[in-house]
Amino acid sequence: MNKALKGLLLALALVVGTLSTASPVMACPMCRVANEDTEDPAAEARPRAYMYSILFMLAMPASIATFFGVSLYRLSRQRDAMNEEVLGDNNI
C-alpha cells in the first residue's frame, strides 16, 4: 500500500476509535449538576438557552466585521464621488 492510503486508513481508524469510546452525554461536573434538576421548568430551557448564547457569541464577530466593512465601503464610495467632483470641475 502507498503512504497516502496508509495515512488515510490510520486517520479513519483513529476517528472511529475516538467516536466509539465517547459516551452519549459528556459534560463538565458543574454543567451536569446544573441540568439535573428536571422538576423546574426553567431547567428544561437551559440547554436551549445555552445553545442560543453560543450562536450569539459566534454571530457577534461576523456582525461587527460586516458593520465595519460596509462602513469602509461607503466611505470609499463617498471619497471617490468627491474626487470625481473635484477632478471633473478642474478638467473643464
Image (cartoon, helix red, strand yellow):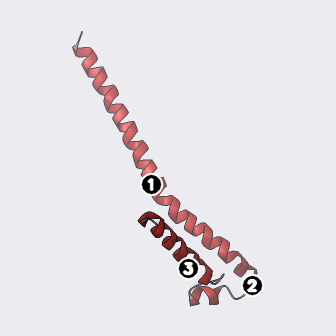
Are there few (<14), some (14-19), or many (20+) residues within 10 Å of tag 3? few
Q: Which residue occupies the foreground of this view, 89 or 23?
A: 23
Which of the two discs, 3 and 1, sits closer to the camera?
3
Which label number is shown at residue 30?
Answer: none
* Residue 5 or residue 79, whichever sits in front: 5
Which one is earlier in the sequence, the residue at label 3 or at label 1?
3
Local SS, label 1: helix
Image coordinates of residue 63 in percent, x first then y, are 48, 54
Give the labeled residue for mark 1: 64
Residue beneath the point at 31% across and 32% down: 79
Check disc 2: other Cα within 10 Å, few if <14, some if 14-19, many if 20+.
few
Write down the residue under mark 3.
18
Where residue 70 sits, quadrant-wise, is top left
Q: Position of residue 14 (x, y in %)?
A: 52, 76
Q: Tell me the CA gap for discs 3 and 1.
A: 37 Å
Q: Do the residues labelled 3 and 1 touch (CB within 8 Å)?
A: no
For residue 54, above or below residue 67:
below
According to the picture, the residue beneath numbered tag 2 turns out to be 40
Where 59 sits versus 10, above or below?
Answer: above
Which label sits in the foreground, 2 or 3?
3
* Frontmost residue, 88 versus 7: 7
Q: Residues within 10 Å of mark 1 (few under 14, many from 20)?
A: few
Q: Where is residue 17 in the image (x, y as percent from the top left)?
A: 57, 79
- SS class of the residue under badge 3? helix
Q: In this view, does 86 lie above or below 56?
A: above
Q: What residue type is labelled 1?
A: Ile
Find residue 22 and report its image quarter: bottom right
Label pair 2/3, CB-CB below 8 angstroms: no
Report helix, strand or loop for mark 2. loop
